[in-house]
Image (cartoon, helix red, strand yellow):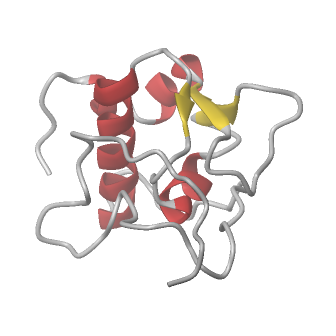
Amino acid sequence: MANLPDMTKHRGFPSGMPGSGIQFTIRRANPKGVTPIKALPRRARPGTAEHRVDAAFLHALWHHFGAEPFERGNLDAARLNLLFGREVVAVDKDFDPKSYDAMLVINEKVARQNFPESFEDIMEV
């Protein structure tokens, strides 16, 4: 097995969207290299299934980390990229998009505006 980079596994974080096959975390580091974090255009409109997935992921982030900075670790890049630059932002100016150690934080003002349901105690999915 290749020598994989260290990657924090966020214990207790939901692995994905129940009953959908959509993952929120990855099991192991990518042997081909770390998938970069970059802002991707989001086409999901409120009320769509895609919006519900983004909201559920943000709900999990908020209820796991709150307003505190968190390490990227084993969080799925595809999910993060749909929130990055808006609801989730880099903590540092020298942010490395290809590092599992990169520090992120929820931009609470933007996140509450775009996904108010993510901040409820319980979110129906």
Q: Residue at x 52, y 67 (%)?
A: 29
Above or below 121: residue 15: below
Q: Residue at x 66, y 68 (%)?
A: 35
Above or below 6: residue 122: above
Q: Nearer the viewer, residue 51 or 107?
A: 107
Q: Residue at x 60, y 73 (%)?
A: 3
The percent position of residue 69, horizontal first and vertical second, equals 56, 22
The percent position of residue 14, horizontal first and vertical second, equals 23, 49
Q: Quadrant of residue 74?
A: bottom left
The percent position of residue 81, horizontal first and vertical second, equals 61, 56
Q: Quadrant of residue 82?
A: bottom right
Q: Residue at x 74, y 57 (%)?
A: 98
Above or below 58: residue 35: below
The percent position of residue 94, horizontal first and vertical second, equals 88, 34
52 horizontally vs 38: left or right = left
42 horizontally vs 97: left or right = left
9 horizontally vs 56: left or right = right
Above or below 40: residue 61: above
